[in-house]
Amino acid sequence: MDEQDFFGEGELVAVLTTQPLDRKLDYKAPEGGCFRGAFVEVPLGPRKVLGVVWGKGRGDFDYSKVRSVNRVLDVAPMRDEMRGFLERVSEYTLTPMHAMLRLATRAPGLSDPPSMRKIYRLGEGEPSRQTDARKRVVETLTEYGGLAFTLKELSDMAGVTSSVVKGLVKQGVVREEDTPRDVPFFRLDPEHAGKDLTADQAAGADALRAGVRSGKYGTTLLRGVTGSGKTEVYLEAVAECLRMGRQALVLLPEIALTAEFLTRVEARFGSKPAEWHSGVTMTERRRIWKMVGQGGAQVVIGARSALFLPYQNLGLIVVDEEHDTSYKQDDGVLYNARDMAVLRASICGARVVLASATPSLESWANAEAGKYEKLELTSRFGEAVLPEMKAIDMRVEDLPGSCWISPSLQRAVNTRLDKGEQSLLFINRRGYAPVTICRACGHQIGCDHCDARMVEHRFLKRLVCHQCGETKPMPEECPSCHVEGKLAPVGPGVERLAEEAQTHWPEARLAVLSSDLFGSARALKEGINTIAEGGADIIIGTQLVAKGHNFPLLTLVGVIDADLGLQGSDLRAAERTFQLMRQVAGRAGRSEKKGQALLQTFQPEHPVIRAILSGDELGFWKTEADERRHAGVPPFGRMAGIILSSPDVQQVFDLGNALARSDGPLRAIGAQVFGPAPAPIARVRGRHRVRLLVKAEKSAPIQAALAQWVGQFKLKGDIRLSVDIDPQSFY
């Protein structure tokens, strides 16, 4: 063992803590010594805090005053590749290392000693007397397939008191057991139940398996039309990874996708994988974190933060729907999980599969340039064929001013209802109406804390700010002129569209799919399952429905406002509109029955709308790439956003102007600074926001220049500065 890897009792070690400090701290190694990478508890002032032994201490402090590490935690040490990954992400995103460590230790109770606990799982028999509360407990345990929960978790999930659970224990319907808090997951069997693949899929699976077997880094862009079976192809790569004794990570963009996906993984490998996202209980988070580090979790299905789990032997990362903007973290550590997945794999010699029907331009350009391998699935699985796509020219439709479903779309829905098939009406706006205006004075109701209009949510009977989450009851009178009865909704949201659909089809069963209409991830999963099983005739949904769901009876998709994303100055507006329209259209006709997608548009001649309808994806990407290349913007140039915020508007503009005047470090690398300018939403949560934009050539060392540039200024008072490398959003 290299002597630098172990530090004997009393030796100085440098410990990185999760506290907001600008350096590592020196401590004496505890009795018995410690390894580099060990998770430790150290004293900091009067507190005990979590840290990691990063290496040898600096020794520039009076040794007699150096305090000792309290104890080494009983978890697997942080591996060299993980420390290197955190350092590289820190350098790339200009994020302090303490924030990176916090991101990598997002599990509660890591410093708690191992202990036993009472857990509750499904027993045998039926309750002596059935009640709604008892029924909910049994249904909760049944739904999670034999998993056990603590008393509080089970009570909360079932919405009952603990006495209900204990009553079922006395009857044997629920079993109470003592168990170690953190146990390995059931082993997954790569030979359990492989599916018969088409020739197209088999060729793709063979290529991915060969890449995994090589044991070397490489990235593959797996592009396949919606419904082509990309999931089955990359699950074969997961199987190969398991055969080699390595761990696999599958990233999904939305928590709502996990239920159906976990079912498919369990069917393929015989057991459920680890599941990591915001909806997972705290107890389960700690278990997953520890088991991933010990090798007790072979496959993790997770949201973007699963990338920062302490894998023991990571061999494969799959980024499903790799184009999705949900992979960009927009607060705290500003990173793109797709790009960081490639970085992590390159450090630990793993393979990356980027899967999408509509890849991001960045991934498309990397594949064209030969940096990524490319696999294509060109036909749908089985009998399914791609939907027919048509535009409805809204300029010639006879439609009243307060309605949004055109007569042409109404006729198409009627046809589906007659056949017993499902229709989807899609609009990418939550709530009832995006604007509430007073018809007496013209006042638009805005948020008290943000420069944003409040959105009416009629189902909730409240106005909601989609920036800060502030809510208030729907007022009876105008807050400005105090006239009653003159407040009117302007424009449609998903709830208003549902109301209109109800008037057109009063006998139809309607289901509204929007993230804010479900109280929990479990309720959302149940809603999606009900629809998939035929429990609705017409689905009204936001972009939530565009991501990976399979509704076998759905044969018609009607897009209410296909032009919605084309307005504004976002450089990715065309790309995102193209992706969203193609994705949502792909929900139609995924079974034996042929599907159709109708796009309501006032601009049928717009190049993006024409590309969507024609299916000329290659032509679209080439045109979009040429425009971006000419403008020198990503992926053919570098960009960074600087966001300044403060309760004092003058303070942020003063700092923004000072930054713009002192741009020497940026000019030295040929970069340009634009701004300062108010952010599109200039005030959020009471803080005024100013943006600057930095643009540089692709090869420019932008991170070092940015660090030198912003390092010229010491932030005073309550002003905050954040740097967003490769910004995805410009709000």
Image (cartoon, rainbow, N blue to C red):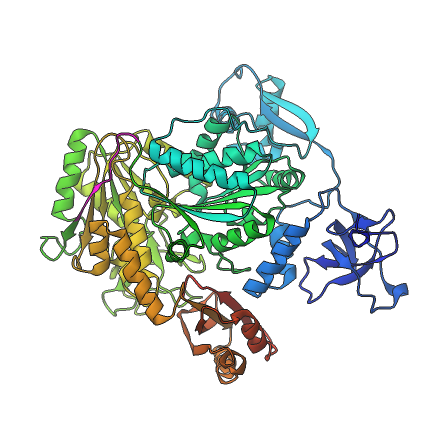
Residue 151 percent location from the top left of the image: 62, 32
> Residue visible at 37% across and 41% down?
548
Residue lying farthest right? 64
Question: Image check: 23 left or right of 635?
Answer: right
Q: Height in image: 232 above or below 279?
A: above
Q: Quadrant of residue 401?
A: bottom left
Q: Which of 183 and 637 is in front in this view?
A: 637
Q: Which stretch appears magenta?
A: 382-390
Q: In which quarter of the image is the C terminus?
A: bottom left
Q: Height in image: 393 above or below 669?
A: above
Residue 15 percent location from the top left of the image: 75, 58
Number of callouts: 0
Q: Nearer the viewer, residue 713 or 248?
A: 248
Q: Is residue 301 visible?
A: no
Residue 402 percent location from the top left of the image: 18, 54
Q: In which quarter of the image is residue 96?
A: bottom right
Q: Nearer the viewer, residue 706 or 687?
A: 706
Q: Is the magenta stretch mostly helix, strand or loop?
A: loop
Residue 688 percent location from the top left of the image: 47, 72
Q: Height in image: 502 above or below 383?
A: below
> Residue visible at 48% across and 59% down?
330
Q: Does the magenta stretch include residue 387?
A: yes
Question: Image check: 706 left or right of 373?
Answer: right
Residue lying farthest bottom? 661
Q: Does the magenta stretch include residue 43?
A: no
Q: Nearer the viewer, residue 421 or 342?
A: 342
Q: Can residue 71 be seen in this view?
A: yes
